[in-house]
Image (cartoon, rainbow, N blue to C red):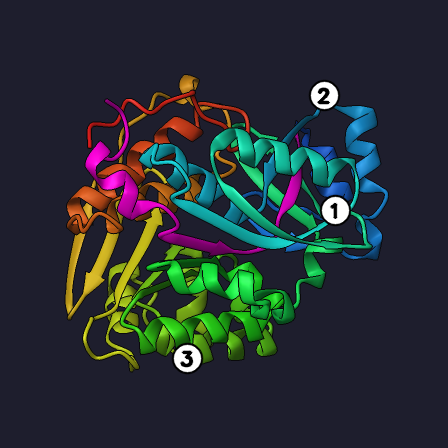
Amino acid sequence: MPGAPADKHEELAGSILCMGNPLLDISAVVDQAFLDKWDLKMNNAILAEEKHVPMYQEMVDKFKVDYVAGGATQNSARVAQWMLQAPGAVTYMGSIGKDAYGKQMKECCAEDGVTTQYYEDEAATGTCAVGVLDGERTLCANLSAANNYKVSHLEQPEMWAIAEKAKFYYMAGFFITVCPDAIMKVAEHACANNKIFTMNLSAPFIMQVPPFKATLMAALPYMDYLFGNETEAQTFAETEGWETRDVSEIAKKISEMPKTNGKRSRTVVFTQGADATVVAREGKVTTYPVIKLAKEDLVDTNGAGDAFVGGFISKVVLGADDAECCRAGNYSANCIIQQNGCTFPKVPTFDF
């Protein structure tokens, strides 16, 4: 049977709460001229500026596009639910519009088994342009409604009851740009109740923009796990004034930074594309190889890091060790990069 053991299903119900910026991905294979025109760099993620507004329509007009429910945290939530195959294990909160894109997002998550508790805003549902070239991706997000999530939604009694029931929390760094109050409310609750609170660095700009970096650093003492990739790790080191650009050394240093809940040490997990995954805890760094994939089998790296996190946390909630968590993360990422966008087969073949 795929997924978590059946005898674990009942305790897994409602155990994972993810919060983030739900976006409908508009994905297309593009050309270099398009990237140059809109000042987009491969393997990077940015927030749309005024100049990018016409870009979305140009993508639709010029290229064959796919629409996929996206947003970094929502991707991880969908993958974790897919891996576990346990009814109602994952709940997701964020803000969408009262429109067709929002309806599409609800249907997609329902089909994947994720319980959604969206705040519904008057603004349009957020979108993310995903440009793919030679298997690599660039992201440009127009948050729109996703930018309007308020902590008051989380504070509603029925929503906070969901937060209290959960044992594990995950938020991508992108949520820092939207609702720091919700991040800190959940972080403090997790710490006070010895639950697992996790975040992701998500993109270099989170560390390069001073107010975003300040929120990240305020939340860091509460983090039991911190995820990221090699570029984000090096940007973190740069903004901290560290001389090292060695990913293992950076992971080790972050793992040893002050932590509020002394009952559990911090684990830092950095993926490096086709290179080994770095895991640091208590001054020790271990690397775990990824699953090799022939270049001709690579379809699209969009969502690979999100999928890794989804797979990883599907094992953390079951109490697995780092090696098992990385095995699940690497399996999930390997599946996703052979598909368009963050999509996956009906059931995983992963051996739990």
Nearer the observer, 71 or 131: 71
310 on left or right of 109: left
Report how far apart the C-alphas of labels 1 and 2 lie in the structure. 21 Å
What amino acid is at disc 3?
Gly
Numbered tag placed on residue 241 in the rendering: 3
Q: Quadrant of residue 238?
A: bottom left
What amino acid is at disc 2?
Lys
110 on left or right of 315: right
Report how far apart the C-alphas of labels 3 and 1 lie in the structure. 38 Å
Q: Residue at x 42, y 20 (%)?
A: 346
Q: Earlier in the sequence, mark 3 or mark 2?
A: 2
Numbered tag placed on residue 64 in the rendering: 2
What amino acid is at disc 1?
Thr
Residue 169 covered by magenta stretch: no
Q: Earlier in the sequence, mark 3 or mark 1?
A: 1
Of discs 3 and 1, which sits in the foreground? 1
Q: Is residue 344 above or below residue 12?
A: above
Classed neighbour count for the residue bearing mark 2: other residues with Cα under 10 Å, few (<14), some (14–19), many (≥20): few
Task: Tell me if residue 204 can be seen.
Answer: no
57 on left or right of 46: right
Report how far apart the C-alphas of labels 3 and 2 lie in the structure. 43 Å
Q: Quadrant of residue 335?
A: top left
Q: Residue at x 20, y 71 (%)?
A: 264
**Which segment did they paint magenta?**
1-27
Q: In what element is the residue under mark 1?
A: loop
- In the image, farthest residue toward the top: 296
Numbered tag placed on residue 133 in the rendering: none
Q: Residue at x 21, y 62 (%)?
A: 280
- Residue 205: percent from the left, percent from the top? 57, 64
Q: Which residue is mark 1?
A: 125
Q: Is residue 191 above or below residue 53?
A: below
